[in-house]
Amino acid sequence: MKKMYYLVALVSVSVFLISCDDDDAPYYDVRDEYAGRYGVDDYCDIGVSDYVLDIYKSDYDDEIVFGFPGLFESGMDVYAIVTGMKIIIPIQQFHVSTFPDIFYEFSGSGSLEDSVLTVEYQVLTVQNGLITDDVDCSAKMIRE
């Protein structure tokens, strides 16, 4: 009887261990939803411009980059943090001139719905430590 008890216990443990599969979900990178080429209608305080922009994944797991020609057609690679179907553009400065000392400062947020990425952002022009210009923009980006 003792042998039978051990045999039943051994079979039960074996069945339990065999039935345990690895339940890891397949890897999904939400940034794939953003990466691609977009036609951009950029509505800013100073006017409207249309251009084509590439968005690609950065080396960091939660970031995308607005590639050339960049937001505001600035030529700068502005990055954004991806939080699902929303993005956050943290404050980031780009040096554009040494004399006078001028920086562009970008910040903003956006959301992706189907193939349309809408981005609300602000560009400050900072000269010698003072804000000399403040431009608010709303970009509608449609994946091509």
Image (cartoon, rainbow, N blue to C red):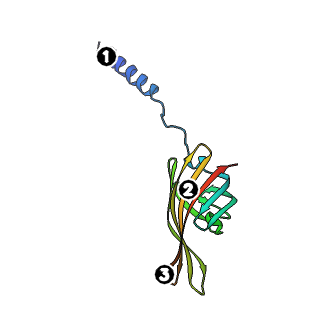
Instruction: Tell me residue 16's x, y (percent).
Output: 41, 25
Residue pictured at 63% horizontal, 56% vertical: 56
| Mark identifier at residue 119 | 2
| Amino acid at the residue labelled 1 | Tyr
Front-most of residues 42 and 27:
42
Real-space CA distance between mark 2 and mark 3, rounded to the nearest whole angstrom? 26 Å
Q: Nearer the viewer, mark 1 or mark 3?
A: 3
Q: Secondary structure at mark 1?
A: helix
10 on left or right of 47: left
Instruction: Tell me residue 89's x, y (percent).
Output: 51, 61
| Amino acid at the residue labelled 2 | Val
Residue assigned mark 1: 5
Instruction: Tell me residue 33's x, y (percent).
Output: 59, 46
Res 64 → quadrant: bottom right
Residue pictured at 60% horizontal, 85% vertical: 98
Real-space CA distance between mark 2 and mark 1, rounded to the nearest whole angstrom? 67 Å
Front-most of residues 124 and 1:
124
Mark 1 or 3, nearer chain start = 1
